[in-house]
Image: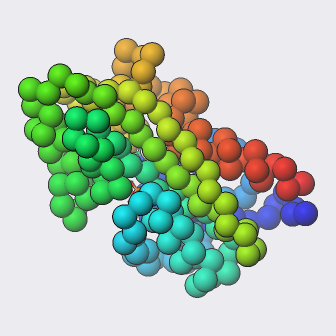
């Protein structure tokens, strides 16, 4: 049994992810950021799967700071590129992690390619006490020919989810969260946490 004001750290250095998760969770749980616990480390992400990296990030915080913790790892998988950039989405165009460069490289690699199918996958790893749990979310869509929209982050300006005629970057945060990979994985996380009452 855990209390409603139980503190859980979200182990991410990505401010956009933090704000998306806080929007989704609302006041149901207290989500602490890495800054809140005074962690400014560059947490290693050396695994070659989303599951592996999500677990590495959560385990790092649990072991070093003792907090219950969750982390997400996300990838954009493009069918015509055999699933690339996938687990390497953050550094597709190099270690600088610039979203604009990543998007441009992806568009360059898809020049003349008509099969634009792609999906985002998110894996959330939660460590509560000694228990580890994984939650997964996915959204299917396609890669557009040019970037469009100013919302969201990362690859959002070039990803159009199935059933919509706009990119994630052209949607409100609420609409993106309702159907996105992270929104779906987070819904499963919240179902699990709610069940602990
Ligand atoms: P942390 O590891 O600190 O959480 P990160 O930005 O490195 O942050 P990931 O490794 O999970 O996060 O992200 C992989 C890449 O995918 C990164 O370039 C993101 O910009 C991009 N990405 C993640 N979620 C996304 C989303 O909802 N929409 C668009 N791009 C996203």
Residue 94 coordinates in the image, percent (x, y): 18, 61
- Give the left or right position of residue 45, taking residue 5 as reference: left
Tag count: 0
Q: Residue furthest bottom?
A: 64
x 53%, y 78%: residue: 60
x 55%, y 34%: residue: 177
x 52%, y 57%: residue: 72
Quarter of the figure with residue 149: top left
Residue 166 coordinates in the image, percent (x, y): 36, 19
Nearest the eye: 137 or 13? 137
Nearest the eye: 92 or 35? 92
Q: Is residue 40 above or below residue 99?
A: below
Nearest the eye: 62 or 136? 136
Quadrant in which the N terminus appears: bottom right
Q: Is residue 131 visible?
A: yes
Q: Residue furthest front?
A: 82
Residue 4 coordinates in the image, percent (x, y): 84, 57
Quarter of the figure with residue 162: top left
Q: Is residue 160 above or below residue 6?
A: above
Q: Is residue 138 above or below residue 86?
A: above
Quarter of the figure with residue 41: bottom left
x 41%, y 40%: residue: 120
Q: Is residue 128 above or below residue 87?
A: below
Quadrant in which the C terminus appears: bottom right
Residue 135 coordinates in the image, percent (x, y): 61, 51
């Amino acid at each position: 049994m855990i209390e409603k004001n139980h503190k859980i750290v979200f182990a991410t250095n990505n401010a956009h992810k933090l704000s998306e998760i806080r929007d989704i969770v609302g006041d149901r749980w207290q989500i602490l950021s890495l800054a809140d616990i005074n962690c400014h480390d560059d947490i290693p992400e050396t695994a070659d799967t989303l599951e592996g990296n999500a677990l590495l990030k959560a385990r790092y915080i649990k072991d070093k700071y003792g907090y219950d913790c969750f982390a997400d790892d996300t990838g954009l998988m493009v069918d015509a590129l055999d699933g690339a950039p996938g687990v390497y989405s953050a550094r597709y165009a190099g270690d600088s992690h610039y979203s604009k460069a990543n998007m441009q490289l992806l568009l360059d690699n898809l020049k003349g390619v008509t099969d634009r199918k792609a999906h985002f996958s998110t894996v959330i790893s939660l460590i509560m006490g000694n228990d580890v749990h994984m939650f997964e979310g996915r959204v299917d869509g396609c890669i557009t020919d040019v970037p469009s929209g100013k919302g969201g982050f990362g690859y959002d300006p070039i990803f159009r989810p199935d059933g919509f005629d706009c990119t994630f970057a052209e949607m409100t945060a609420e609409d993106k969260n309702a159907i996105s990979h992270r929104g779906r994985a987070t819904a499963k996380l919240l179902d699990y946490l709610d069940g602990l009452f």
